[in-house]
Image (cartoon, rainbow, N blue to C red):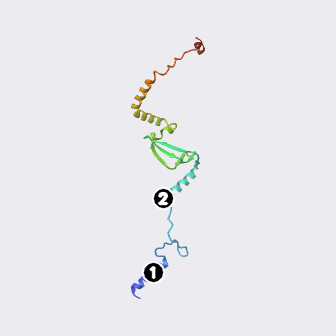
């Protein structure tokens, strides 16, 4: 046997005995595994930490909420459809999670008018003022044509209505 044959035999023996490319976890007497188990990702760990924090706060799930809208100062709306809503009343904390979309206010308008606050109503009036100069003139012209057909509303009479009706 030559030196090269001895080196090749040693390499085969080491590969066979110690696994070579096979990964083993643990020491003597432990079960050898064919591959290493992948650890959880950073997102899964942060979700677990968030869950334990919510449990400490005593947050409870609120069922039956179909949509949630956050109104931003720039006129955009963060819109959640069927979100998971949790609340901790003692900590004054509300947690809303789920898929969201950022949309302009005009896109959601017919359905969210009842949710608008004073700030949003002023934004809405400003948008209507910008969008309606041409439309307002057309509406005024149309209403001017309709004034001839309408009956005039009689003036209110002060006093007793029965006496006036008897006259």
Q: Quadrant of the C terminus?
A: top right
In the structure shown, which secondary structural element does the residue marked by tag 1 occupy?
helix
In this view, 149 is above or below 47: above
Q: What residue is rendered at 50% in x and 50% in y?
A: 99
In this view, 140 is above or below 79: above
The numbered dot on residue 12 is 1
Q: Which residue is mark 2?
A: 42
| 19 or 160, nearer to the observer | 160
Q: Quadrant of the N terminus?
A: bottom left
| Residue 31 falls in image quadrant | bottom right
Q: What residue is rendered at 50% in x and 56% in y?
A: 46
In this view, 20 is above or below 136: below
Q: What residue is rendered at 49% in x and 79% in y?
A: 17
Could you say where residue 107 lies in the image, as x and y percent from the top left? Answer: 46, 41
Alpha carbon separation for disc pair 2 and 1? 39 Å
The single residue placed furthest to the top in the displayed view is: 167
Relative placement, left or right, of 11 versus 31 is: left
| 103 or 59, nearer to the observer | 103
In this view, 124 is above or below 1: above
Could you say where residue 48 lies in the image, as x and y percent from the top left? Answer: 53, 56
The single residue placed furthest to the front in the displayed view is: 149
Tag 2–tag 1 contact (CB < 8 Å): no
């Amino acid at each position: 046997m030559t030196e090269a044959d001895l080196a090749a035999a040693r390499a085969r023996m080491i590969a066979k005995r110690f696994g070579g490319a096979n990964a083993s976890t643990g020491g003597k007497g432990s079960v050898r595994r064919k591959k290493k188990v992948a650890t959880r990702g950073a997102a899964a760990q942060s979700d677990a930490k968030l869950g334990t924090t919510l449990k400490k706060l005593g947050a409870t799930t609120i069922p039956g909420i179909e949509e949630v809208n956050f109104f931003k100062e720039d006129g955009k709306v963060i819109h959640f459809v069927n979100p998971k809503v949790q609340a901790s009343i003692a900590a004054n904390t509300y947690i809303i999670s789920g898929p969201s979309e950022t949309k302009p206010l005009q896109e959601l308008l017919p359905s969210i008018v009842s949710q608008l606050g004073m700030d949003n109503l002023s934004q809405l009036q400003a948008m209507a003022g910008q969008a309606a100069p041409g439309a307002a003139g057309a509406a005024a012209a149309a209403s001017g044509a309709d004034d001839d057909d309408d009956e005039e509303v009689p003036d209110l009479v002060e006093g007793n209505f029965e006496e006036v009706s008897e006259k």
